[in-house]
Amino acid sequence: METIEGYVEKIMFKNDENGYHVLAMKNKDGEFVSCGMFSGVSEGDGLKIDGNWFNHASYGRQFKAESYSINPPSDKESAYRYLASGAIKGVGQITALRIVQRFGDRTWEVLENTPEALAQIAGISKKKAIDIGSQIKEKTELRGAIAYLSQYGISNLTALKIYEKYGQKLYQVVRENPYRLADDIDGIGFVKADEIAIGMGLSTDSDYRINACITYSLGEVSESGHTCYPYEGLLEVVKNRLGVEIEEADWEQFIYNLIVERKIVMHKEGDVKYLYLPYLYKAEKTTGVILKNFTGYEDLDEDAFFKKIDIYLNRKSIDLDEVQRAALFKCASNQMSVITGGPGTGKTTIIETLIDYFEDMGEEIVLAAPTGRAAKRMTQATGRKAQTIHRLLEFGSSENGDNIVGRDEDNPVEADVVIIDEMSMVDINLMYLLLKALDRDTRIIMVGDPDQLPSVGPGNVLGDIIEAFPEHITRLEHVYRQSEDSTIASIAHDINAGIEVDFSVKRKDFYMAERIPEKICAALKPIITSQMPSYRHTKPIDIQV
């Protein structure tokens, strides 16, 4: 690794989101280009950069920065470069020249310590002098903050976020309770805050550390798909993670304090106490309340209904069994319905028939799915446009990067019927937002297989709905759709039913290859790159593992 010094002549490119910059720089040896994470750098800044030279395929030789520090101007030439660069609002080249002509090599000392002296210069009022001094002070403080935080392995971009949040109070925050950083700053989690705290000598059994670990652990279990965790179980998780002993009475006090601070929620089911992060508790409980409001029933004439349905079915030469016909009637007569079943059981056929029925009734229908791939499959299967739930809800970002949702209770989705496919992939947060955005007269039909593709986010939404509202559920179990050459669907149903599968039988599209974990990737490579593409006439990129 090399070290190089120079000043920023021009910022050629910058990404405000991640702090990546491309800088045109200059030193006594000439001009050069440096790239890397340069948060808080301005044109005119003098930099000391650690990194390495490399040749960019399009832009030639560049110096890639691994770390850097900002050198304050040390003489009148460097002070002029900085002031004339436009880094200080209200100071241009002419004013910069007047300042350095008046104070010479002492310019930076004056700017930092006695900025009111600038009022001696023609064209600079006392108010402007104080404003220039304030800007210099803020930039100096930022540089100091970046240098201070860098000793704890905090990147310049994250240091900038910390400074913007706390200002000069950041030193007090880091000294007294570095775990606040995990709560307040994107990019710093419990693990990094814990490293800082331990490095500063904070006690391993400090209250700050235990409180932070409790909320962190609840967040971690949510990433594993859970919305909550048992009270006693979380105690063991925290003790094991921190390597400390926590008495039962102390644990009760920690939990009580966090509840009072509204950082966690405790809910009791029977004799078991569960702990939640507040947003997950709100999402789960509100979803349950809203779903209970979607249990309306329409008293349909069954004979008249099936006369209409048979017209659609005869037109397409489709025969449905009694369970499938019952599913159609349940979806048409209930405000909320769930159709569940494995592959090949006729879920898509029922969706198509329902679309025909509701369209004939003059109702506005919206089709959606949790992922782009699922929405595309839904479009191909039904011949109607389907979209992701995120697009339906008009997800977006605000100017400061926060997620925003365009559809909610004040601006609901414009639809009479909403059909959601692949419900097993819908997590509790998405379900909560979806239900909030539906008018209370809207009919919702959910389709999915609880044994397939669970949600990445927290919650077992489809499974919980099936358990909580059994009268609204239709289970399809008979397999209809399966090509003569395929055995996948029938074997999947056998496995779910607990029927033993004979893996010694050779099948064209299904086989078991036993491998130790270390050999799995090696075994998959020929399957993905050659065997399946030649068998299915597809590309490796289209194969899902």
Image (cartoon, grey):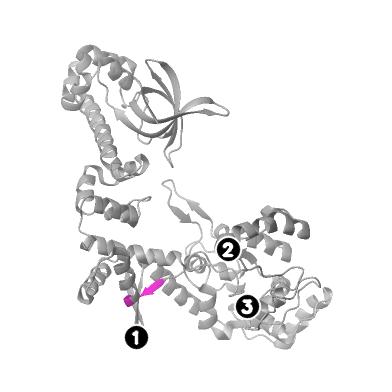
Relative to the observer, which residue lies in front, 509 or 332? 509
Q: Position of residue 303 (x, y in %)?
A: 74, 88
Disc 1 to disc 3, C-alpha distance: 32 Å
Q: Which residue is mark 2?
A: 370
Q: Which residue is mark 3?
A: 340
Regarding residue 35, the answer to whether it shows in the image is yes
The mark closer to the camera, 1 or 2, is: 1
User: What main secondary structure does the magenta stretch of the protein show?
Assistant: strand
Mark closest to the chain's N terminus, 1 or 2: 1
Mark closest to the chain's N terminus, 3 or 2: 3
| Identity of the residue drawn at 39% across and 71% down | 281
Q: Considering only vertical position in the picture, is 70 above or below 179?
A: above
Asked if the residue under mark 2 is in contact with the one under mark 1, i.e. CB atoms within 8 Å, the reply is: no
Q: State which region is magenta.
A: 228-232
| Identity of the residue drawn at 54% across and 29% down | 56
In terms of secondary structure, where does tag 2 sit? loop
Relative to the observer, which residue lies in front, 287 or 465? 465
Q: Which residue is mark 1?
A: 271
The C terminus, quarter of image: bottom right
Mark closest to the chain's N terminus, 1 or 3: 1
Q: Position of residue 307 (x, y in %)?
A: 77, 83
The answer to which image quadrant residue 424 occupies is: bottom right
Q: Position of residue 12 (x, y in %)?
A: 46, 27
Asked if the residue under mark 3 is in contact with the one under mark 1, i.e. CB atoms within 8 Å, the reply is: no
348 magenta-colored: no
Disc 1 to disc 2, C-alpha distance: 35 Å
In terms of secondary structure, where does tag 3 sit? strand
| Identity of the residue drawn at 39% across and 70% down | 282
In terms of secondary structure, where does tag 1 sit? loop
Circle 2 residues within 10 Å: few <14, some 14–19, many ≥20: many
